[in-house]
């Protein structure tokens, strides 16, 4: 029997080295950071039995879409063509630069005449979600990374199921890993009511389209293609609820109405087509111009940017980088997970050296300890050049907000980390008008008042063992 096991082990080793020989050229051609490429090559070559399957589980950074909705090509239909803007028509200089970069990176052009309402409280967000569901006259499209199995998650499903029973066409797309528990039972009432539910990229290799780590992190709810809820909030009592509680995280979302809606609708339909193979008809899914909202709050120019491992360019990363490098006097960042790559890190340090007021708010106590430790490994080099770092204390911070001068504001699903920029499917909203940018800035200042600034001298005295742990987590941060 021992001889049999030896032969099996030998056979696996030989097969592993054959696969390693074939796989290493692919790793080289992916053009990662040289240190990451070298690490994968060594792991695959020296321990192919473990390295080869590990690469396919967490090392693949690109996928090909087997089915792509043709809707992306027709998003700027007649209802929004008149509202399309060229980058040079945007109201600010940095906005023009950022919008041009996004357009070159294959995002739709900016649109003017939108209405944006920010939601900074979990109770406001909860009411907005239920109101949006109740307002639908034809269809509801929803996609979220996490649907928690809790009272808020169940109430969300009940609300969708009630509309499905009334004849509203309901489509719900959930990330297969982030919402795996909800996909088992919680969504059943919606299916029973006639709604459609799909899982995005199952995490287990028995499925045809699977990935253990390329996740759909987008948050989006659209009613009739005329009004949308988006931002950083998932569905669950940690994020929103009928009453504010101490356990509820600090987060921000927005309700958007206007000519940008076809771009959001096209994004959902593209993801839905990939997950289900169903390409939906175009005509009934976009509203006529008369549906677009007008009036207060003031109209806003904005640009919808989506990024993910299925796209050749990295629009959100490129847009953020362009804004950071153009900042003249203010660069404010609020993010729950801060693990920048070399480019973003250099842009922040360079801005601080140019005299820009660079401030960062991160959680005082994070829900992801390893990510928090990896982020803190950057604090010394940031504070050394003048970046001011603040720890939000009242609860966990989950808000994702960027403010650059009075020219560009960003909200959405991406964090300022390598996972959001290079691995996840993300959705960002770039705002170009001052009233909306100042509203984001005022929210930032409100959270700043509940934060404690990190003392560079005291922080530098932390134990060497803690510094070693932070640097170790930093090495593995792309896998989190």
Image (cartoon, grey):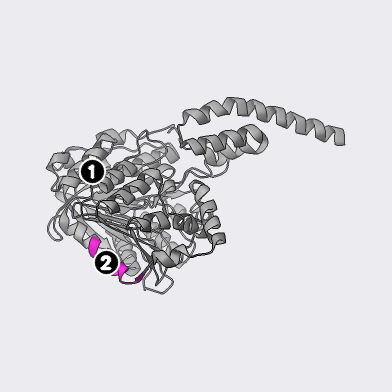
383, above or below 393, in the image: above
Which residue is at 20% across, 51% downward?
328
Q: Position of residue 243 (x, y in %)?
A: 37, 73
Label 2 to label 1: alpha-carbon separation: 24 Å
Q: Are marks 2 and 1 in contact (CB under 8 Å)?
A: no
Q: Secondary structure at mark 2?
A: helix
Residue at position x 46%, y 37% in the image: 33
Total numbered badges shown on the rendered structure: 2
Q: Is residue 448 magenta?
A: yes
Residue 207 image offset from top left, x and y in percent: 55, 39
Q: Secondary structure at mark 1?
A: helix
Q: Identify residue for label 1.
A: 98
Q: Give the magenta range.
A: 441-452
* Numbered badge on residue 129: none
Q: Residue at x 37, y 35 (%)?
A: 311
Instruction: List x then y, in percent, for residue 155.
Output: 41, 64
Q: Callout 1: 10 Å neighbours few (<14), some, many (20+)?
A: many
Q: Main secondary structure of the magenta part?
A: helix
Using the image as rendered, state which of residue 131 and residue 73 is in the foreground: 73
List the residue tagged with mark 2: 445
Q: Which is nearer the eye, 421 or 254?
A: 421
Label 2 or label 1, whichever comes before in sequence order = 1
Q: Quadrant of residue 41?
A: top right
- Left-right relation of 411 to 33: left
Against 468, is 313 above or below? above
Left or right: where 64 falls relative to 1 = left
């Amino acid at each position: 029997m021992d001889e049999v096991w030896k032969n099996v082990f030998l056979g696996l080793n030989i097969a592993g080295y054959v696969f390693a020989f074939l796989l290493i050229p692919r790793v080289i051609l992916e053009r990662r950071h040289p240190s990451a490429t070298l690490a994968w090559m060594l792991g695959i070559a020296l321990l192919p039995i473990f390295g080869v399957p590990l690469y396919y589980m967490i090392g693949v950074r690109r996928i090909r879409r087997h089915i792509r909705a043709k809707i992306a090509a027709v998003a700027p239909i007649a209802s929004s063509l008149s509202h399309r803007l060229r980058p040079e028509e945007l109201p600010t200089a940095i906005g023009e630069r950022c919008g041009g970069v996004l357009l070159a990176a294959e995002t739709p052009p900016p649109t003017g005449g939108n209405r944006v309402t920010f939601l900074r409280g979990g109770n406001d967000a909860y009411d907005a979600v239920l109101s949006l569901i109740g307002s639908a006259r034809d269809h509801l499209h929803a996609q979220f990374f996490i649907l928690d199995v809790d009272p808020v998650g169940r109430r969300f499903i009940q609300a969708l199921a009630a509309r499905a029973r009334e004849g509203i066409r309901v489509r719900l797309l959930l990330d297969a890993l982030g919402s795996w528990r909800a996909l088992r039972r919680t969504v059943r009432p919606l299916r029973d009511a006639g709604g459609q539910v799909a899982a995005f990229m199952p995490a287990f290799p028995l499925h045809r389209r699977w990935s253990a780590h390329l996740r759909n992190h987008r948050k989006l709810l659209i009613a009739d293609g005329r009004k949308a809820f988006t931002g950083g909030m998932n569905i669950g009592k940690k994020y929103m609820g009928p009453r504010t509680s101490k356990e509820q995280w600090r987060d921000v979302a927005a309700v958007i109405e206007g000519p940008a809606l076809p771009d959001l609708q096209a994004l959902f339909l593209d993801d839905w087509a990939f997950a289900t193979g169903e390409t939906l008809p175009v005509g009934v899914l976009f509203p006529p111009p008369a549906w677009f909202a007008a009036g207060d709050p003031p109209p806003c120019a904005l640009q919808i940017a989506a990024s993910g491992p299925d796209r050749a360019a990295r629009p959100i990363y490129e847009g953020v980088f362009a804004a950071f490098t153009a900042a003249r006097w203010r660069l404010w960042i609020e993010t729950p997970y801060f693990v920048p790559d070399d480019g973003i890190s250099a842009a922040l340090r360079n801005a601080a050296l140019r005299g820009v007021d660079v401030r960062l708010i991160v959680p005082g106590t994070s829900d992801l300890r390893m990510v928090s430790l990896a982020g803190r490994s950057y604090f010394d080099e940031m504070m050394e050049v003048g970046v001011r770092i603040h720890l939000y204390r009242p609860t966990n911070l989950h808000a994702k907000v960027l403010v650059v001068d009075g020219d560009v504001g960003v909200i959405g699903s991406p964090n300022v980390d390598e996972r959001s920029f290079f691995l996840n499917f993300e959705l960002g909203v770039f705002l170009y008008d001052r009233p909306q940018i100042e509203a984001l800035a005022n929210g930032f200042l409100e959270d700043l008042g509940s934060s404690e600034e990190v003392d560079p001298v005291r922080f530098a005295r932390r134990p060497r063992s803690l510094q070693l742990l932070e640097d170790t987590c930093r090495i593995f941060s792309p896998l989190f």
